[in-house]
Image: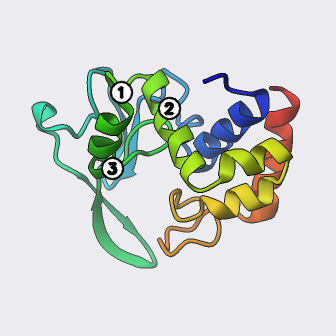
Amino acid sequence: MQISPTLTAFLSLIAWSEGTSTSTLTQNNGYDVIVTGLDGPAIFTDYSDHPFAPQFNRAPVVFRLPAIPANTSTAAGRYQILYHWWKIYRVNLKLPDFSPASQDAYAIEQLKERGAVALIGTGDIQAAIAACSNIWASFPGNQYGQGGHTMDTLLSKFAELNSTA
């Protein structure tokens, strides 16, 4: 699939919003970031599979936010992909690994499923963000209770990212 500059900017918006592309630890534009937990952020270097796959013997990360009790997560990569969903999408999309290309394909598939790719194509970025709010906790309008960004902040950041795409 050819990725348009506008879709590339939206993918970059997700990474910025989730804090992966701006992580002080990332060595690969957020593709190597594990969700920030009580022990602080971490990165991984083996892209052969999701970093929480059984062969890596990594326990889910414990995180705590003021509004919610301690919880665990397996979110990893540029788009904070949960291992549970990765297992399903990896098979369905025939993804060979957890490389940047596979992470992008995963995120694009999720955008397609919610109709966001079409909305991005027509320039309705606000509707695309709203359509995906149940996926990314940093988007407004979800039930995760993890804070996040306002719609105005995301639209402003998208405009900035899209102007350089």
Which residue is located at x 82 percent, y 62 percent?
A: 152
Which residue is located at x 11 percent, y 31 percent?
A: 55
Give the labeled residue for mark 1. Answer: 95
Residue 131 percent across, percent down from the top left:
64, 62
Q: Which mark is residue 85?
A: 3
Q: Which mark is residue 5?
A: none
Q: Which mark is residue 105?
A: 2
Residue 102 percent across, percent down from the top left:
43, 27
- Colour mode? rainbow
Measure how far apart labels 1 and 3 are at the Cα level.
Answer: 13 Å
In this rendered view, identify the residue nearer to me: 6 or 37.
6
Callout 2 amino acid: Ala
Which residue is located at x 58 percent, y 59 percent?
A: 138
In this rendered view, identify the residue nearer to me: 60 or 136.
136
Crowd class of label 3 (few under 14; some 14 to 19; many from 20; radius 10 Å): few
Which SS class for mark 2? Answer: helix
**In which quarter of the view is residue 22 placed?**
top right
**In which quarter of the view is residue 67 placed?**
bottom left
Q: Is residue 18 left or right of residue 58?
A: right
Crowd class of label 1 (few under 14; some 14 to 19; many from 20; radius 10 Å): some
Among the two numbered marks 1 and 3 on one chain, the one whose residue lies closer to the N terminus: 3
Measure how far apart labels 3 and 2 are at the Cα level.
Answer: 13 Å
Is residue 149 visible in the rendered structure shown here?
no
Which SS class for mark 3? Answer: helix
